Amino acid sequence: MLFIFLYFCLQYIKKIEIQKMKKALVIIALSIFAVSCNKTAEVKEVKTAYVDTSILMKEYTEAKDLEAKYKGQAEEKGRQLQAEITRFKQDAANFQSQAQANGQAWAQQRGAELQKREQQLGYAQQALSQQLQQESGVEMDSLVSGVKKFIKDYGKKNGYSYIYGTGDAASILYAEEKYDITKDIIKALNDKYKSSPKSEEKPAVKEGEAAKK
């Protein structure tokens, strides 16, 4: 009888130990799950935003000033060239009315001169266009690089994990408007540009070099 009693006591003790182990396993599993949930929550707390680059370049004061600068240069340098083109058109019109009266030899010589002038004016127009494109392109590249650096610094300062760019060459097909920080970036850029000292403009290239005959 004593043996049977001891046997049942041992079985009862084992049962209690198994229950304790199960409880411990449950506690461990719950702890792991809680840690996992916390990590998931941390991953979800990624601060992100996007900037509409096409609007940014339209509203950024420095970009507008740069556009106005080269538009003014094109108009100023183009006026002298346009005067040469107007004179050429007048001479060409006179040539047609005078060719018959002055004879074939005169017409051939005068026609060759007009043809040469027309060619030179075409070269001058092309040279002027290329000059303005090259100069404005260098300044625009510098401006874009500055904007990219500013946005990068802005993102670090304000705790963003990602700032995407969208616009004419968009890689984002959809984003909620609450993530749009375009206006904030424009204001910050314009404030910085307004407070920065303005450097003196370089003297314009003489027009005579572009319209040499």
Image (cartoon, rainbow, N blue to C red):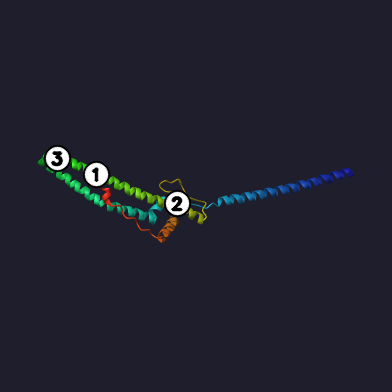
Q: Amino acid at mark 3?
A: Ala
**Position of 151 relative to 8 (above/below):** below
| Disc assigned to residue 107 | 3
Mark 3 surroundings within 10 Å by alpha-carbon count, few (fewer than 14), some (14 through 19), many (20 or more)? some
| Disc assigned to residue 146 | none
Q: Earlier in the sequence, mark 2 or mark 1?
A: 1
The residue lying at 25 percent from left, 44 percent from top is 122
Q: Which residue is mark 2?
A: 148
Helix, strand or loop at mark 1: helix
Helix, strand or loop at mark 2: helix
Helix, strand or loop at mark 3: helix
Q: What x and y, as percent, mark residue 6? A: 86, 45
Q: Earlier in the sequence, mark 1 or mark 3?
A: 3
Mark 2 surroundings within 10 Å by alpha-carbon count, few (fewer than 14), some (14 through 19), many (20 or more)? few
Label 1 – label 3 distance at C-alpha? 20 Å
In the shown orientation, is residue 206 left or right of residue 143? left
> Number of numbered discs present?
3
Tell which tag, 2 or 1, sits nearer the viewer.
Answer: 1
**Position of 99 relative to 38 (above/below):** above
Q: Report if the CB atoms under discs 1 and 3 are less than 8 Å apart.
A: no
Q: Earlier in the sequence, mark 2 or mark 3?
A: 3
The quadrant where residue 185 appears: bottom left
Q: What x and y, as percent, mark residue 89? A: 19, 46
Q: What x and y, as percent, mark residue 15? A: 78, 46
Q: Which sits in the foreground, 187 or 72? A: 72
The residue lying at 64 percent from left, 48 percent from top is 33
* Residue 137 in view in this figure: yes
In the shown orientation, is residue 81 left or right of residue 43? left
Q: Which residue is mark 1?
A: 120
Taking the view exactly as shown, the residue that stands out farthest to the left is: 101
Q: What x and y, as percent, mark residue 51? A: 45, 52
